[in-house]
Image (cartoon, grey):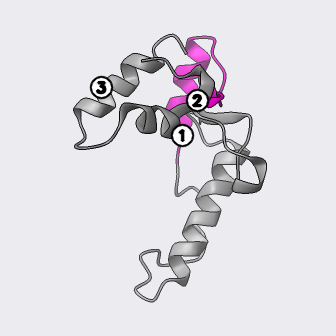
Amino acid sequence: MKNAGEVARMAEAQTEKMDRKVLWASLYAEARAEQGGAPVKLQFDYVVTDRVQRLLDDATAFLNELPNKPAATPRIRDGGVDDHIAREVLASRGLTSPVGVVMAQPLSAYRE
């Protein structure tokens, strides 16, 4: 969280009429569980994990249900997302997925 204030300042510089605290909250603030909140605010998986595959499956199924069908089928075909190069990069550097996790923060953690 050491760079959270600077990230919020950069976001503010790229927007118009959006308060920095609102931008910070959208990036880092915790939400109540009944609103879909979870301890992890953002997770950088880098490769297609089971969690990422579920997100892809859900999004594709949703898009396929729309009238204009931006997704041609309700599921991405097997092999449609190839992350083998990303897996090789992680392995060559001795890293695992996720490569980063941002934990949700109370609004009181906001600093100007």
The answer to which quarter of the image holds residue 11 is: top left
Mark with earlier residue (3, 1)? 3
Element marked by disc 2: helix
The image position of residue 108, as x and y in percent, is 61, 24
Residue 104 magenta-highlighted: yes
The extreme bottom residue here reads: 67
Mark with earlier residue (3, 2)? 3
Residue 78 seen by the camera: no
Q: CA distance from mark 1 to mark 2?
A: 6 Å
Q: Return the mark for residue 87.
A: 2
Dot 1 corresponds to which residue? 83
Identity of the residue drawn at 23% across and 36% down:
14
Residue 95 seen by the camera: yes
Q: Quadrant of the N terminus?
A: top right
The image position of residue 4, as x and y in percent, is 47, 20
Residue 63 magenta-highlighted: no
Q: CA distance from mark 3 to mark 2?
A: 31 Å
The image position of residue 59, as x and y in percent, is 57, 64
Question: Which amino acid, mark 2?
Answer: Arg
Element marked by disc 1: loop
Identity of the residue drawn at 55% across and 83% down:
65
Question: Which amino acid, mark 1?
Answer: Asp
Check the image and report above or below for 69 versus 41: below
Identity of the residue drawn at 66% across and 29% down:
106
Q: Nearer the viewer, residue 18 or 10?
A: 18
Task: Look at the numbered discs 1 and 2 and tell me whether their residues touch, using CB distance below 8 Å.
Answer: yes
Dot 3 corresponds to which residue? 10
Horizontal relation, residue 37 to residue 72: left or right: right
Question: Which amino acid, mark 3?
Answer: Met
The image position of residue 22, as x and y in percent, is 44, 39
In this picture, which residue range is highlighted in magenta?
82-107
The answer to which quarter of the image holds residue 18 is: top left
